Structure formats: structure tokens, C-alpha cells
Amino acid sequence: HNDQLAQWDRENFFHPSTHLAQHARGETATRIIRTASGCHIEDRDGVRLLDAFAGLYCVNVGYGRQQIAEAIAAQAKELAYYHSYVGHGTEASVTLSKMILDRAPSNMSKVYFGMGGSDANETNIKLIWYYNNILGRPKKKKIISRWRGYHGSGIVTGSLTGLELFHKKFDLPVDQVIHTEAPYYYRRADTSQTEAQFVAHCVAELEALIAREGADTIAAFIGEPVLGTGGIVPPPRGYWPAIQAVLKKHDILLIADEVVTGFGRLGTMFGSDHYGIEADMITIAKGLTSAYAPLSGSIVSEKMWSVLERGTDENGPIGHGWTYSAHPIGAAAGVANLKLIDDLNLVENAGKVGAYLNKTMHEALGDHPNVGEIRGEGMLCAVELVKDRDPRTFFDAANKIGAQVSAALLGEGVIARAMPQGDILGFAPPFCLTNAEVDEVVGKTVKAVNAVLPAGA
Ligand code: PLP
């Protein structure tokens, strides 16, 4: 297609996370997506693809849900917008706040609405700074994040993100953000270490960082229950309880970033439920509306809320607001989406079909000489490609093996994501995926892996 749209796209469109020069030179084509239904998207040429990454792990209920589309349309006709500042709300936003708190862990108290995961994490950091100022500890401000964590692309949230690409040439991370070990057993553990020993190592690294910086300078720790964009890595058994014990000891707050795991992806309503995490704040976005409209939230615990309240008694209204906080269209999408998840038992389905996906992927590719690890939890699965399994040797990044395999898979009609760091093929399908679709995804993945890395070659 060397047509008008392609030209406009090249000339005018600044695409996110893209090699800008290659795009401008026309070396990378833009697929114009026209429509979608269930787990499939279709482009303007009629090419139909099975989307095993649910957009950016966000279209959790699948595409084309008329109930959500109709709720959005009805809201737009009735009231497309009103703000939620002092003394205002809408039926949809108030209802959604109740639905979120009904589903959240019991220590949670209130939800502040934003537009996307990045701004929700910015809100979290501001509220935590405010909290410590009200408590009279102005030095306690640093935030610990993990290498390979993903928390957004803003100045602070891009700093929290522990991927080099998001720091390089941006002068990030900012001083208040510090990083610690990722609970990534396959890559980070010494080959002689057991999982328990590796957890002890993660804990020791965290303790050492806190000792070096001083606990009185550290406000919070942020983590995804399962590392997502950093490689889809479920933590080793015992990781979260051990980390939480350290945080409690040093009076450091915990933010569970559930942008990917919230509302069912692990087969439980929240990842915190799955791992027994007791967070002080929870970040939600993607699955809150299944991406039918942009909406995010910062859920605040009762412990924090009482201090925030006191802060406003002492200082007046809280100076934090977005024009689009609790946008009615996003809220209407959220209400319809959460209802649909309940009505169709999609959380349970994510758990069941996700288990089948992980099992089937193991059976099909577990013995391939270039597959180092297959890992996952719920409706998340990763296939990590290696040059050699024993001794574990990774490919040179310049070979772009992960990208080659995902391109081969795309040629077979299936979308998986080549994760940004390492040769990792990521799967995060919509929750309505069927076992038959799992078989198709796995069968085609085997073909794609073999096409790029012929077994035994
Ligand atoms: N947090 C996590 C765990 C994410 O995966 C993402 C996005 O992928 C974000 C935050 C940022 O969300 P957004 O891209 O909506 O700003």
C-alpha cells in the first residue's frame, strides 16, 4: 500500500516506542487496523490475525463487545463529560468506584481516577510524598523499583521503569528513584542457586540498598506482582512475603502495580490476591475498561487515606487533579466491562485457559534446544529463547532473535510480543480465548520457532 494513508502516516504521525527514522524512511510499514472481534483483529486489507497479546495486554474481555460499546454510546449521548472536582460526580464514576472497592483487597479505602497507568503511578508517588510530609518526615521520599519493572513512561514513572531503553538519552532515572534486583530466577540466579537461595539474595540486595540509602530516606517500593514488560516473569515462591517483611520492618510503603494483573489476568481478581500481597496502594488501568476507553486508578489503603484526610484538614484541598479524572465515558466503559467479566466468569476462564496455554506450550516446546524457559501464570506466558541451554547462553541482542520469531509467527497469523529486553516471546491473550485457539497459537509458535531456529541446527 503506497497510498495516501501510508504517506500521511509517514509524514505526520509520531508513533510511540518506534524507530522514528526507519518509519519516516518507509522501512517499516504501518498496519492500519480496521475492525476486531473476539480474539481477532482485522486490517484494511482483510488480513485477520489472532491477537495473543490482547493489544498491549489490555483488551481482556476481547474485542467487539457490544455491551461496552453501547454503554459508551449511551453515556456519550447523555453526558459526554463533566469534571469530578469539588462536589461533582457522575452516575458512572460513582458506581465504578463502588465496584472497584468491592473487588479490591479489604484494606483498600478509596480510588482516585486517572487516564492511563503512567499517570496513575505519578499520582501514587505524589500521594506518598504528601503522606510523608503530613507525617512530618520530609526526608522519607525515595522510591525503590526493580530492574526490569515497568511502571510507565513519564519523568518519574519512566524512572521507575527499570529498562535501559526508557532511560537512555532522557537523563533518567531521577534522583529519587533507585533500583534493586529483579526476581528473575532464570536469568539472574547463579546456576548453583535454588529458588529459595535466590529469594534470599533478592532480600539481601534490598536490605543492603536500604542500609546504604538509610531507611529514613525511603518512602516506598513499587512492583508488579508478575514482572510484565520486563519479560513476563512470575516471582519465585516466597518472594513477596519475604520482600514485604523487609518493607514492614523499615516502614516503607508498598505499591502493587496491577496495571496488567488487575481484574483477572492471573485467574484471580487481583495479583495481590494470588500472591498474598498486602499493598498500601494499587495501580489499575488496562483491564479496568479492557481498553474500550482510557481510564486508570490509584487505589489507596485506609492507612494512607486517614493521613491524606488529616493533611487536607491542616492544609486545605489536595492540589492534585486532572481534567479527565473519572471521565464519564471511561467510567461507563469500566462499569460495563466489570459487569461483563462477572457475567461471563472471565476471571475463572483466564485461570483455566491460561493453565492450558502454559501446559500446552511446555509440552510443545519444552524440549526445544533453543528454548531456555517457558514460564507463566494465569493468562500470561513467556517463551525465552537462548543460544544454548546448557550452559545457559543468551543470543547477542543484535541478532534480534525474539523479533524474528515474532515476525515469523505474525506470518502465520498470530500476534505475540517480542518483549523489549531479551529474546522473549510474550503471550497475554484476551480472557475469552478458547482451548482450540490455544492449540492454534501453540502450533503456530512451534512452526515459527522452528523456522528461525531449526531444532538441532
Ligand atoms: N504499569 C504497568 C505494570 C504497565 O504494564 C504499564 C503499561 O504497559 C503501565 C504501568 C503504564 O501504563 P500506560 O501505558 O497506560 O501509561
Image (cartoon, rainbow, N blue to C red):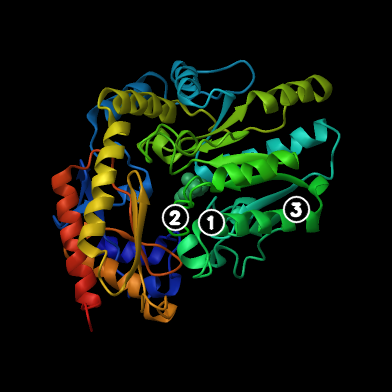
Single out the residue that lies furthest toward the bottom. Answer: 457
Sequence order check, earlier mark of 2 and 1: 1
Q: Position of residue 376 (x, y in %)?
A: 36, 52
Q: Element at badge 1?
A: loop
In the rendered view, would you say 230 is above or below 80?
A: below
Q: Element at badge 3?
A: helix
> Residue type at mark 2?
Val
Q: Which residue is mark 3?
A: 210
Instruction: Tell me, for residue 137, which label it has, or none.
Output: none
Q: Which residue is mark 1?
A: 183
Q: Is residue 75 left or right of residue 111?
A: left
Q: Nearer the viewer, residue 159 or 221?
A: 221
- How far apart marks 3 and 1 lie (CA) works out to 17 Å
Sequence order check, earlier mark of 2 and 3: 3
- How far apart marks 2 and 1 lie (CA) works out to 8 Å
Q: Is residue 29 left or right of residue 233?
A: left
Q: Name which residue lies at 42% across and 33% down.
A: 288
Q: How many C-alpha atoms fall within 10 Å of the one at disc 1: few (<14), some, or many (≥20)?
A: many
In the rendered view, would you say 3 is above or below 369?
A: above
Residue 410 in sight: no
Q: Position of residue 423 (x, y in %)?
A: 38, 69
Q: Looking at the figure, which quarter contains the N terminus? A: bottom left
Q: Which residue is mark 2?
A: 233
